[in-house]
């Protein structure tokens, strides 16, 4: 079957973002990782083919897997063990392979899949866990790039009396403060995902301004900035407030509908898709029509009001200072979007 998501899942992005020089590597030190191809969606695809051939009916690996029956995108997967063909984890997403792999410079697919499985078992968010592992590596507690040591370290979280495990379970910022790391990629204390905001500025504006903390799914401007959807947008542009606000409002609208957010890739460019979504929601609400942006903006206003009452101000809508100070190789760029532009996202809603 054709289709990037069907064949390689969300992890098709591993090689794409790497080639764009925007793949955060070694706790956001560079935008290119030599080992990315080894843990990419293409690598999972090849492993599934290999184990299916070797183990036949007994093989459990899959790509083109619908995480719920009826989905025609089918971006999910099951990562098999090379030696037995049995499932290690399902699914291995791009963000996870990046967080537990690339950002920790681990390029062994089996180790990454095992780390993912442990996170699932512990109920840990994999982006937060990967960034916390990177804090352990940055502090010198464990070495960079050693998957086996990382697995052993993560397993400390099973022991409620283990000091490292207890700290780890509190997330990236808490671990960084405890272990003495000062390059901490968080916004509102939530760890950053798999796109460096210095190389792709619109997503940086979303990280900074969304009420949730650094959350790529809250306004996925990667679609126009890298994938050319909705007419495209220069990733290095500095005027991103309108783009990020529009994506945040539309995403809030899609999220409240209950549809998987990945339908956005299709409906951004196919008018009938958006009409279908509008009709579903109208039927549910018992209304003939409504304004998408209005619905999304109303949700965002409630979220921001909650944050305001919890003590958040515009000063919390910022990226960590090192993104402004440190140049990101290979393109040697910094996050040059001004604070005024960040504040413009929600100035007049
Ligand atoms: S429902 Fe969404 S996440 Fe699940 S397979 Fe379909 S597109 Fe992928």
Image (tube, rainbow, N blue to C red):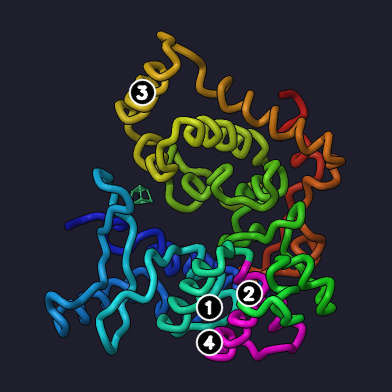
- For the magenta stretch, what is the residue range? 129-157
Work out whether mark 1 precedes mark 3 in sequence or the reverse, and give the earlier one: 1
Q: Residues within 10 Å of mark 4 (few under 14, many from 20)?
A: many
Q: CA distance from mark 3 to mark 2?
A: 43 Å
Q: Which residue is mark 3?
A: 280
User: Residue 326: horizontal and vertical position, in percent?
Assistant: 76, 69
Of the two numbered discs 3 and 2 on the same chain, state the one appearing first in sequence: 2
Q: Which mark is residue 147?
A: 4
Secondary structure beneath label 4: helix
On the image, the x and y values in percent for residue 27 come to 67, 74
Q: Position of residue 286 (x, y in %)?
A: 42, 11
C-alpha separation, residue under disc 2 versus residue under disc 1 = 8 Å
- Per the image, the residue denoted by label 2 is 30
Q: Residues within 10 Å of mark 1 (few under 14, many from 20)?
A: many
In the picture shown, does residue 288 fall above or below 330?
A: above
Q: Which residue shows up at 64% across the image and 73% down it?
A: 329
Which residue is at 73% across, 80% downward?
A: 161
In this rendering, the count of numbered labels is 4
Residue 72 visible (yes or no): no
Upstream in sequence: badge 2 or badge 4: 2
Q: Nearer the viewer, mark 2 or mark 4?
A: 4
Question: In this rendering, would 345 be left or right of 217?
Answer: right
Give yes or no for contact between labels 1 and 3 (Cβ–Cβ under 8 Å).
no
CA gap between label 3 and label 4 equals 45 Å
Is residue 144 covered in magenta? yes
- State if disc 1 and disc 2 touch (CB < 8 Å): yes
Query: Can you identify the residue that label 1 sits on?
Result: 33
Q: Residue at x 73, y 66 (%)?
A: 170
Ranked by sequence position, the earlier of labels 3 and 4 is 4
């Amino acid at each position: 079957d054709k289709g990037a998501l069907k064949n390689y899942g969300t992890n098709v992005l591993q090689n794409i973002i790497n080639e764009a020089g925007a793949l955060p590597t070694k706790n956001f030190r560079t935008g290119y990782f030599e080992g990315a191809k080894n843990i990419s969606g293409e690598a999972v695809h090849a492993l599934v083919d290999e184990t299916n051939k070797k183990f036949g009916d007994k093989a459990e690996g899959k790509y083109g897997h619908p995480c719920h029956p009826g989905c025609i995108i089918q971006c999910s997967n099951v990562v098999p063990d090379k030696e037995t063909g049995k499932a290690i984890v399902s699914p291995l997403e791009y963000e996870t392979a990046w967080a537990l792999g690339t950002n920790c410079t681990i390029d062994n697919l089996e180790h990454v899949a095992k780390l993912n499985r442990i996170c699932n078992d512990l109920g840990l968010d994999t982006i937060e866990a990967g960034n916390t592992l990177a804090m352990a590596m940055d502090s010198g507690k464990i070495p960079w790039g050693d998957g086996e040591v990382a697995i052993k370290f993560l397993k400390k979280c099973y022991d409620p009396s283990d000091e490292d495990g207890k700290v780890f379970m509190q997330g990236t910022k808490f671990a960084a403060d405890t272990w003495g790391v000062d390059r901490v990629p968080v916004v509102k204390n939530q760890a950053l995902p798999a796109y460096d905001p210095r190389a792709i500025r619109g997503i940086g504006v979303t990280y900074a301004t969304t009420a949730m903390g650094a959350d790529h799914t809250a306004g996925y401007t990667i679609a126009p900035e890298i994938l050319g959807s909705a007419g495209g947008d220069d990733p290095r542009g500095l005027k991103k407030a309108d783009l990020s606000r529009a994506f945040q409002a539309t995403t809030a609208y899609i999220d409240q509908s209950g549809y998987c957010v990945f339908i956005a890739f299709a409906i951004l460019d196919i008018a009938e898709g958006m009409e279908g979504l509008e009709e579903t929601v109208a039927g549910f609400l018992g209304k003939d029509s409504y304004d998408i942006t209005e619905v999304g903006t109303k949700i965002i206003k409630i979220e921001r009001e909650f944050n305001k009452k919890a003590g958040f101000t515009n000063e919390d809508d910022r990226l960590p200072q090192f993104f402004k100070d440190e140049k990101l190789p290979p393109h040697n760029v910094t996050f040059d979007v001004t604070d005024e532009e960040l504040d413009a996202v929600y100035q007049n809603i």
